[in-house]
């Protein structure tokens, strides 16, 4: 392997420790509510991880578990109650939601000041406008990885593979705000390999195991792998063929241990920032 490894675990641990220190000096415990519908085992693991990390940082994390057949009206009423609860600074609704529930209506019901996922249209709009806001945790985590790894962004060609609302699009907005020249590619793009090969910074958020091959990577490029995919044998892999791309890239994130830990750490930071802002208003 020739690429420098960008170690998300240690960068995330440093961020969590800094959030914990800021909470201690703020002198109050921010409150985070995580709303979960149903018993999806993958979601349960994420929620437990978030819960533990929040408690360790000094955040009062409250999981609100509702049955899978909860009506949209009941879910909206729960969110309304959390919006009005002064002990709650951050609200996160675990996605995806069961069929029959309008995800947009649910996200739009969250008070934008408590929207620690950064998915509310007001926060999405502010981000697209380059204004400070509560920013989606995964792309925010990627920006922090790039900063920690000293990757120059101003003027760099950045290619984002994937255009989802929760990852690809906000990722592109953040890179643009950092003065990168940004291209987004997706399932209808022509010549994916050629587009990716132009990138100084290549960010894969596609959900296809090891789709990015070494021939897609410009020698020396920084490769950030957001993908989390489970192979039939249970092995966790990213969207990038790590072993072979690491021979070409200049710096690369592993899966696991790259972007994933940053997502949770950024959720804690967003919760603290939301709490501080609410107390200033
Ligand atoms: P989505 O399925 O919502 O979006 C995938 C994107 O990839 C779409 O824009 C889609 O294009 C594009 N795409 C799919 N197939 C191809 C293809 N063959 N060629 C080109 N583009 C393609 O996924 P998410 O954005 O939610 O997640 C992406 C990955 O990141 C997943 O593996 C997910 O598990 C992971 N993830 C990791 C997180 C972390 O904390 N590390 C957090 C969130 C997600 P189109 O729009 O045209 O359909």
Image: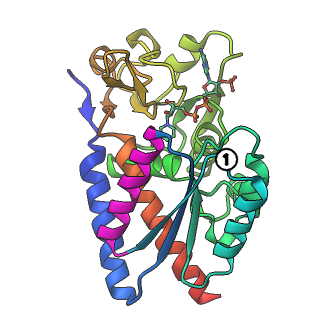
Residue furthest left as drawn: 1
Which picture quadrant has residue 171?
A: top right
Q: Secondary structure at mark 1?
A: loop
Magenta extent: 41-58
* Residue 109 shown left or right of residue 8 in the figure: right
Circle 1 residues within 10 Å: few <14, some 14–19, many ≥20: few
Which picture quadrant has residue 192?
A: top right
Across and down, in percent, residue 130 comes to 68, 57
Residue in the image at 34% along x and 69% along y: 55
Residue 147 visible in the picture:
no
Q: Nearer the viewer, residue 100 or 16?
A: 100
Residue 231 visible in the picture:
yes
For the C terminus, the image quarter is bottom right
Q: Main secondary structure of the magenta part?
A: helix
* Residue 234 shown left or right of residue 72 in the figure: left
For the N terminus, the image quarter is top left
Residue in the image at 60% along x and 85% along y: 86
Across and down, in percent, residue 238 comes to 40, 26
Does residue 42 show up magenta in the picture? Answer: yes
Does residue 48 show up magenta in the picture? Answer: yes
User: Disc 1 marks which residue?
Assistant: 69
Across and down, in percent, residue 134 comes to 60, 63
């Amino acid at each position: 392997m020739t690429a420098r490894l960008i170690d998300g675990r240690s960068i995330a641990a440093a961020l969590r420790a800094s959030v914990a220190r800021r909470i201690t000096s703020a002198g109050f415990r921010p409150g985070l509510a995580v709303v979960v519908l149903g018993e999806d085992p993958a979601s349960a693991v994420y929620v437990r991880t978030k819960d533990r990390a929040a408690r360790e940082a000094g955040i009062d994390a409250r999981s609100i578990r509702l049955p899978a057949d909860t009506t949209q009206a009941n879910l909206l009423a729960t969110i309304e109650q959390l919006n009005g609860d002064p002990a709650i600074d951050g609200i996160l609704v675990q996605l995806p939601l069961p069929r029959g529930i309008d995800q947009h209506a649910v996200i739009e019901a969250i008070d934008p000041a408590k929207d620690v996922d950064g998915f509310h249209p007001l926060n999405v709009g502010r981000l697209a406008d380059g204004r400070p806001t509560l920013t989606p945790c995964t792309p925010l985590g990627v920006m922090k990885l790039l900063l920690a790894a000293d990757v120059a962004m101003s003027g760099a060609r950045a290619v984002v593979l994937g255009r989802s609302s929760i990852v690809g699009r906000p990722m592109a907005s953040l890179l643009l705000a950092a003065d990168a020249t940004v291209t987004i590619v997706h399932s209808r793009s022509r010549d994916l390999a050629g587009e990716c090969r132009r990138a100084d910074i290549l960010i894969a958020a596609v959900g296809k195991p090891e789709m990015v091959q070494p021939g897609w990577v410009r020698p020396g490029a920084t490769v950030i792998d957001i993908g989390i995919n489970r192979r039939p044998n249970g092995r966790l892999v990213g969207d990038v063929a790590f072993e072979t791309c690491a021979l070409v890239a200049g710096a690369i994130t592993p899966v696991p241990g790259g972007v994933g830990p940053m997502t949770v750490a950024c959720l804690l930071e967003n919760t603290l920032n939301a709490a501080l802002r609410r107390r200033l208003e």
